[in-house]
Image: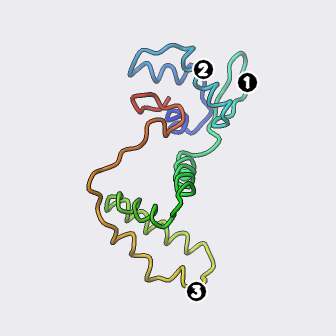
Amino acid sequence: MTRVWEWNRPVTVREVLEDLQKERSIAYTTVMTVLDNLHQKGWVRREAEGRAYRYEAVSTRAAYAAALMNEAWSASDNPAAALVAFFGMMSPEQRHALRDAVRMVQVDEPAEETEESTPAEEPAAEAAPEPAAEAGPAEGDEPGASATGKGR
């Protein structure tokens, strides 16, 4: 998936294979199987081109990451506590990006003055405590990821 997202255009199995072979030995059938699996799962669409297919991402990497975050947050029995814990894991750069994103969303939405959305709440992400230990991504978080964490 990483290759498909990076190129941001329809790709063939051969193109992905040749790119991956710069890093490691891998079989054509392995790449073909992974792309076919991604197609069956709905992550890529494909269009026939001669005897081959061209594969294209259905959504962006950002949309995929957002869906993962939403899924994890929705699974929590205490969404507010989950957010506080998540903010606590963020680096200062990530908290800055969060503040920027909140500002962008607020610009896009009509201003509504409610108890839940007051300007005083925005710095909460900045005040989140730093984590005691860094948490890494769970294995398999990216579609097509191998055990080494590299996408296909």
Decide which of tag 3 and tag 1 comes sooner along the chain. 1
Determine whether the residue tagged by mark 2 lies in a helix, strand or loop: helix
Which one is in front, 73 or 11? 73
Determine whether the residue tagged by mark 3 lies in a helix, strand or loop: loop
| Label 2 sits on residue | 33
Residue 138 drawn above or below residue 67: above
Task: Please give the name of the residue rendered at 47% of the width and 82% of the height, measured from the top-left corner.
Answer: 119
Task: Please give the name of the residue rendered at 39% of the width and 61% of the height, measured from the top-left corner.
Answer: 85
Outermost residue on the front side: it is 77
Q: Position of residue 128 (x, y in %)?
A: 34, 68
Residue 21 drawn above or below residue 106: above
Mark 3 Cα-neighbour bin, 10 Å: few <14, some 14–19, many ≥20: few
**Image mark for residue 136:** none
Q: Position of residue 47 (x, y in %)?
A: 72, 28
**Image mark for residue 48:** 1
Task: Please give the name of the residue rendered at 37% of the width and 59% of the height, measured from the top-left corner.
Answer: 94
| Label 3 sits on residue | 113
Q: Position of residue 82 (x, y in %)?
A: 46, 61
Residue 85 drawn above or below residue 37: below
In the displayed structure image, the side of residue 125 where residue 42 appears, left or right: right
Specify the quadrant of the image occupied by residue 136: top left
Instruction: Tell me how far mark 2 sits from mark 1, CA to CA.
Output: 16 Å
Decide which of tag 2 and tag 1 comes sooner along the chain. 2
Determine whether the residue tagged by mark 1 lies in a helix, strand or loop: strand
Which one is in front, 10 or 79? 79
The amino acid pointed to by label 1 is Ala
The amino acid pointed to by label 2 is Thr
Mark 2 Cα-neighbour bin, 10 Å: few <14, some 14–19, many ≥20: few
